[in-house]
Amino acid sequence: MTTTPIIKRRFIDTSFGQVHCRTVGEDGPVLVMHHASPGSAKQLEALMRLLAARYRVFAFDTPGNGDSSPLPLEVPTITDLAVGLIEAIRALCLRDIVVYGSHTGADVALEVAIAAPDLVRKVVVDGVAVFTPEQRDDYLENYALPFAPDLDGAYLMRCFMFCRDQYLFFPWFKRDRAHRRDNGLGTPEALRDWVVEVLKAGETYFRAYRAAFAYEPLRRIGLVSQPILALSSVEDPLLETTRQAAAQVDAQFRTLPGFRDPEFGPALRDAVFAFVG
């Protein structure tokens, strides 16, 4: 009888508060996962279970997201977020790790590898964003805003629509044919979980987004000394910029099926297995 791996949760004390961590897997190399924005490592749970067949998997909520404390900075950079997570990684005495990151988490994974080469042996990035100056200005102004509580509950609907429309448009706030994604909605349960995780940090989650919009991966990826695997779904709006980033450093590059394809998760798992061993 096949049993579903149980994901355990814990908090790690750091100098800026507590970092929330999910973990699964009993044996094998250590894989540390960094989630996309918005949300938390909750959104990585399905992949964690697949990867736990071969690795000890740890997934952290980025500072100021999910259940992790925010950094004491109004405008943290991706490097700041990475340094905070390195503190949590060292607190767990993890060594010789593989780092994986998706979207904002991919930026974080690159900076963890740059800042802590003694800890990291390989890097997997799943969706790397490269923004034009015009996109950067537009997204900083319109993409991610705080969801401050109000007495009529309007912030709850704003958060729901913010998450829902990311399935349908890119960027989400340009709800027209030109920005329509070739995608459908996720399940009601997945959307509910996503909204809940964003609301947990409704007044700080946007800082990681803004750090990602300001980040310049093409200037930074060449500083990574470890081997890199770059992945992207064929449905990911970041497909071509991921390909561009991979080509700049001659990293391995693999495309994955669409997010709704039942083979997406297994394909990602198999690509990581082949790269890491």
Image (spheres, rainbow, N blue to C red):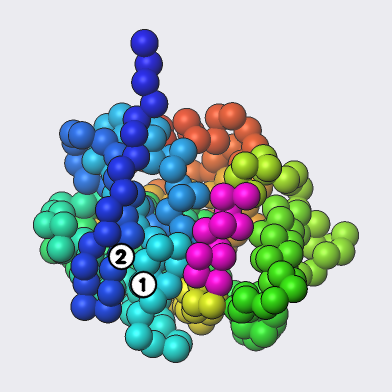
Q: Is residue 200 left or right of residue 271?
A: right
Q: Residue at x 54, y 43 (%)?
A: 255
Residue 19, label in figure? 2
Q: Give percent across and percent down for residue 132.
A: 62, 78
Does residue 67 lie above or below 257 as drawn? below
Question: Is residue 211 found inside the magenta-colored segment of the image?
Answer: no
Q: Residue at x 46, y 50 (%)?
A: 42
Q: Give percent across and percent down for residue 57.
A: 29, 44
Q: Amino acid at mark 2?
A: Val
Q: Residue at x 38, y 35 (%)?
A: 49
Residue toward you, 216 or 26: 26
Task: Write down the quadrant of residue 18 in the picture.
Answer: bottom left
Magenta span: 192-202
**Residue at the disc numbered 1:** 69
Q: Amino acid at mark 1?
A: Ser
N-terminal of the two: label 2 or label 1?
2
Quadrant housing the N terminus: top left
The CA span between labels 2 and 1 is 6 Å
Does residue 269 lie above or below 104 as drawn? above
Q: Residue at x 61, y 78 (%)?
A: 148
Residue toward you, 99 or 22: 22
Mark 2: few, some, or many residues within 10 Å (few <14, many ≥20)? many
Q: Are marks 2 and 1 in contact (CB under 8 Å)?
A: yes
Q: Is residue 51 left or right of residue 39?
A: left
